[in-house]
Image: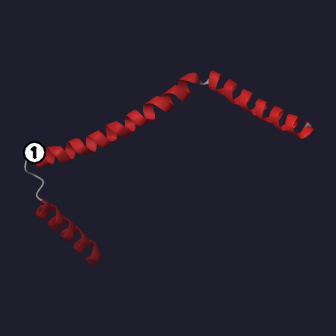
């Protein structure tokens, strides 16, 4: 029973110190928790917006893209 009490005291102290840290750094934690997924979604939306814009303007000609890629790889191989 003494071992169980010691384990519970240890975890209580750890949890209490974690809650104290969270209480002191509320704004930082909120920024990380809220802004990280939002920024991730904005980045994904930006990529899709660029791709969608290329498709709407008719610039998404994959043969041009693959030809440029072949030219770049040829230049790299020549080096």
Name the residue that disc number 1 marks. Answer: 56
Q: Which of the two residues, 79 or 53, is positioned nearer the viewer here?
A: 53
Snapshot quadrant of residue 3: top right
Q: Residues within 10 Å of mark 1 (few under 14, many from 20)?
A: few
Along the horizontal axis of the image, is 28 left or right of 48? right
Q: Residue furthest right?
A: 2
**Residue at image point 32% right, 36% down:** 42
Residue 7 in picture, x, y percent from top left: 83, 38
Residue 11 in picture, x, y percent from top left: 77, 35
Residue 59 versus residue 29 in the image, above or below: below
Residue 19 in picture, x, y percent from top left: 67, 26
Q: Which of the two residues, 30 or 10, is positioned nearer the viewer here?
A: 10
Q: Which of the two residues, 75 or 58, is positioned nearer the viewer here?
A: 58
Along the horizontal axis of the image, is 69 left or right of 40? left
Snapshot quadrant of residue 21: top right
Along the horizontal axis of the image, is 14 left or right of 45? right
Residue 6 in picture, x, y percent from top left: 87, 36
Quadrant in which the N terminus appears: top right
């Amino acid at each position: 029973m003494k071992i169980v009490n010691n384990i519970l005291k240890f975890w209580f102290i750890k949890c209490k110190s974690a809650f104290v840290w969270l209480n002191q750094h509320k704004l930082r934690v909120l920024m990380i928790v809220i802004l990280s997924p939002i920024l991730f979604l904005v980045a994904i939306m930006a990529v899709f917006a660029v791709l969608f814009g290329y498709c709407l303007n008719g610039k998404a000609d994959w043969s041009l893209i693959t030809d440029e890629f072949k030219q770049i790889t040829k230049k790299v191989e020549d080096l």
